[in-house]
């Protein structure tokens, strides 16, 4: 039988195919698959900015009404002005006042430092609802402004109490705790400036 060059090509191809097959089988048996769990929770700068973008965050609102009166003594008769003022005092924080490093994540824990709870809106008296309860005599805008300032101070005294500030802080802690839990943190420490 005569040796045909075509047989050498087939033999060489078969040897190469066998070597390739052995190499693939060996590579497949040595490949390992491992699943690793990363318990760290990373707060991204985008998440921090989106929390700060909330701006003012209201934790407690207190509706109040004040009856304010004044009397001006006259020679023949007295002038009376009695007005009822309505307002809603809103307590909370301004997220633009947080200091750098206000969020400190570490694994599944986070420390949050919030600014002091304070008055969110200084124009809390609803002028449209203000009513003159009783008015006799002539009163000028300065007299009415004086009554407004007295009502304003009384509402602040009645609503900006340590107890209301504590209640607002508790509401704020609860809201922040819930938000941090939804982000995956298990241990949350909230501090106030």
Image: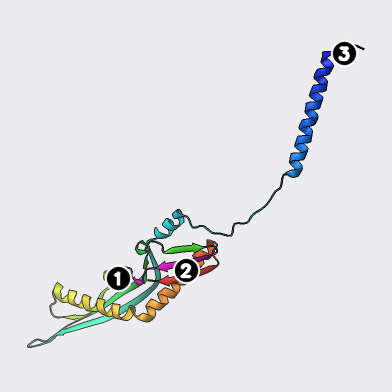
Indicate the quadrant where residue 103 lies. Answer: bottom left
Q: Which residue is mark 1?
A: 124
Indicate the quadrant where residue 158 lies. Answer: bottom left
Q: Name the secondary structure under disc 2.
A: helix
| Among numbered discs 2 and 1, the one appearing first in the sequence | 1
Position of residue 23 in the picture relative to residue 69 (left or right)? right
Position of residue 132 in the picture relative to residue 177 (left or right)? left
Q: Residue furthest right?
A: 1
Q: Nearer the viewer, residue 71 or 100?
A: 100
Q: Position of residue 171 (x, y in %)?
A: 44, 73
| Among numbered discs 3 and 2, the one appearing first in the sequence | 3
The dot on residue 175 is 2
Q: Position of residue 187 (x, y in %)?
A: 53, 69
Q: Residue 95 magenta-drawn? A: no
Query: Is 101 placed above or below 171 here?
Result: above
Which span is picked out in magenta? 108-121
Cα gap from disc 3 to disc 2, whole angstroms? 88 Å
The dot on residue 3 is 3
């Amino acid at each position: 039988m005569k040796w045909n060059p075509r047989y050498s090509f087939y033999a060489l191809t078969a040897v190469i195919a066998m070597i390739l097959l052995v190499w693939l089988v060996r590579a497949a048996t040595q490949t390992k698959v491992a699943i690793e769990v990363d318990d760290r929770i990373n707060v991204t700068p985008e998440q921090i900015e989106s929390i700060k973008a909330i701006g003012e965050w209201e934790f407690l609102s207190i509706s109040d009404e004040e009856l304010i009166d004044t009397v001006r003594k006259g020679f023949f008769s007295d002038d009376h002005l009695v007005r009822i003022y309505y307002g809603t005092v809103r307590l909370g924080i301004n997220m633009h006042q947080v200091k750098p490093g206000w969020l400190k994540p570490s694994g599944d824990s986070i420390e949050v430092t919030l600014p002091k709870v304070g008055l969110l809106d200084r124009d809390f008296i609803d002028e449209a609802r203000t009513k003159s309860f009783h008015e006799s005599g002539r009163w000028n805008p300065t007299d009415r402004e004086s009554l407004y300032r007295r009502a304003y101070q009384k509402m602040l005294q009645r609503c900006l109490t340590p107890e209301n500030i504590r209640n607002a802080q508790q509401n704020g802690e609860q809201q922040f705790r819930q938000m941090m839990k939804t982000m995956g943190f298990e241990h949350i420490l909230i501090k106030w400036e």
